[in-house]
Image: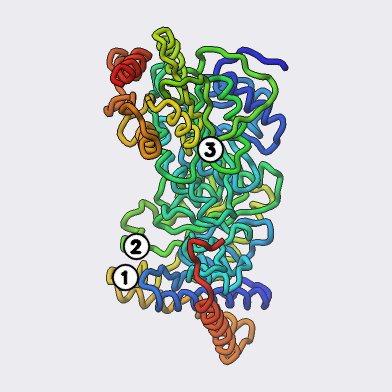
Amino acid sequence: MSSKRLTLREAVVEAIDLEMALDPTVVMLGQDIGAFGGPLQSTEGLWERYGDSRIIETPVAEQGVVALGIGMSLNGLRPIIDLMFADFLPLVANELLQLSANLNYMSNGKARAPFVLRTRGGDGPYRAHPQNMEALLSNVPGLCVVTPGSPAAAKGLMVAAMRSDNPVVYIEPIFLYQGPKEEVRSEQYAIELGKAAIPRVGTDVTLVCYGRTVRLMQLAAAKLEEQGIDCEIVDLQTVTPFDRAAVIKSAEKTRRLVVAHDAWMNCGIGAEIVATVVSEVDLIARPVRLTGPDVPTAYATALRDNSRPTVDNVVNAVTKMLARK
Amino acid sequence: MSEIKFPAEVVWHMYEGMLVSRMLDTKCFNDFAEWYPAFGEEAVTIGAFGSLIEGDFAVPHYRGSMGVFWLRGMSLEQIIGGLLFKTNSVSLGRLSGLHGGDFTKKIMPSVTNVLGPNISSGTGLAMAEKLKGGKGVTVIGFGDGTAALGTLHETLNMAKIYNLPVVYVCQDNQYSISSRSNEFHSWDSLATWAAGYNVPSSRVDGNNILAVRAEVDAGIERARNGGGPTFIDALTFRMGGHLSTDKALYQADDEKLTWENKDPIKNLENHMLNELGISAVEASVFRADVQSRVLDAWAKVISSESVTLESK
């Protein structure tokens, strides 16, 4: 079985490339996705391979473009709408939350919208567009929100998103975009939406994460192992609807819970995870949420870097939790 | 209106559609405190969507949508079932009667109460049709109030640059709830605005169904032959309030009277009497027949099973 070492970005592009070759109904809409190669090289090589009729460049008109893509998905195509950055998600909130999310249920299954809205968000070396909007999209039923935490997951999740018969918002974490490479299987494969991955099995504490914090938790778990603490990592992969069974099963085993995400704490994904776990599992320690602070995301490195969850934050939270038993 | 000719059976069908719309609206207006009738606007709704064939998409405005549902082949029982949340409703009671439609009949449902996305997503239907090499045309209706949204402008621009098979029909009833278009919009006619996007556009008498239908037919033909989008501003008048409980005190008496005299159904009746040699008695028998079909269907549906959480 062949494989290649790819970045997260390269893995997403490979997934789209192979799917476009397999399925002629997959087309892409977006700004600067042609000769420019896409924002942050997110469509590198695709326009050269598939041309203007399938890699369709658009004006700067996000609301109109997202709705256009939704309409295309209702008439036999499987569009991937490339929304340049996650900062623009609130701009298209109505189209996503009240149009696409409603279609299947409100039409009694008669109008299905199989599209993927892909965008890039969160802090990263690029230092621009650092917003995390996943919680905003998660409060409304009907949308599936995905954020991969590694190149291999990124490929399989994008394939599943493109094959889904319902809307999927696929947020590519900028922090990992051009970052650590990983062996990615060369053949096309899908990772089921709504299912978490357990990249590390352990017994002492459950670390729930997605996107950038997957790598953070892995680094923290390696440090904690040196102290004899055995962590279990649950990578949500699909943020909404999240894999309740997998989270609960892990928390039942470890009875300790730490959740980490870059997005704001108030009404965030972490709140939902903690509320779900404490209503189902008797924890032996108070659960901990490590998140961005509830203030707008600042630009200065000192302001930003010192306010995101870090490996040390996780290590300290876990050691404190275990010391308290 | 006599210079425009359609075959007699087409004119009768237009007449029937306008009567179905008017009579359903009248029943709803009388029975529901919250109802948004299209009184006076039937020439636009029935005229704009009357020429669509199988394979075409209808994206109606909510006001007057039931007439479009009927044109697209939904039965009166199905339409009324949607209104009364009965188990025969296409959406199983999830959408209101005027928002539902039936997507399997290529009628776009309105799943958000926000106006605008139906214009842009409806244009997406046309975009896919073009990319797939299909022959279907999409007709999109919306009000003059909705036309001020950025969505329409983003969409007109894209429809032009992608040369899409779509006809936009503004059901220009001159009011957004209580505000008058001519006070809040910077145009004389919306058509001049659409022309700014290089989209062929015109204003028609929206109380003359023959004129509306002829203009839309030209747009459909352009679209079907690869000529791209068309924009039509069909000037009409909302005879009454925004909803049942609105007495429309903000409409002037002389304005109301002027437009009552231009009632599109009476307009077409006059044409039928004068040009097709129909007698007043024939017209009145036909009206009574449509009315009894609507009321019979209503009586049949109202006693049928209502939707519950268990309905499938």
Q: Nearer the viewer, mark 1 or mark 3?
A: 3
Quadrant including the C terminus of chain A = top left
Alpha carbon distance from label 3 to label 2: 36 Å
Which percent across, then down, holds residue B111?
Answer: 48, 54
Q: Residues within 10 Å of mark 2 (few under 14, many from 20)?
A: some
Q: Which chain letter matches label 3? A: A
Left or right: A300 in relation to B91: left
Q: Residues within 10 Å of mark 3 (few under 14, many from 20)?
A: many
Q: How many marks?
A: 3
Which residue position holds label 1? B246
For badge 3, the amino acid type reads: Val
On screen, A127 above or below A50?
Answer: above
Residue plotted at (67% across, 38% down): A25
For badge 1, the amino acid type reads: Asp
Query: Would you say the residues marked 3 and 2 are in contact, meaning their CB atoms lie under 8 Å apart?
Result: no
Q: Which chain letter matches label 2? A: B
In the picture as drawn, the residue positioned furthest to the front comes out as A325
Which percent across, then down, holds residue B271?
Answer: 57, 80
Alpha carbon distance from label 1 to label 2: 9 Å
Residue B17 in view of the camera: yes
**Quarter of the image where one finds residue A10:** top right
Which residue position holds label 2? B177
Q: Which chain letter matches label 1? A: B
Which residue position holds label 3? A168
**Quarter of the image where one finds residue A38:** top right
Left or right: A158 in relation to B83: right
Residue plotted at (37% across, 31% down): A270
Secondary structure state at the residue bearing disc 3: strand
For badge 2, the amino acid type reads: Ile
Residue plotted at (63% across, 30% down): A190
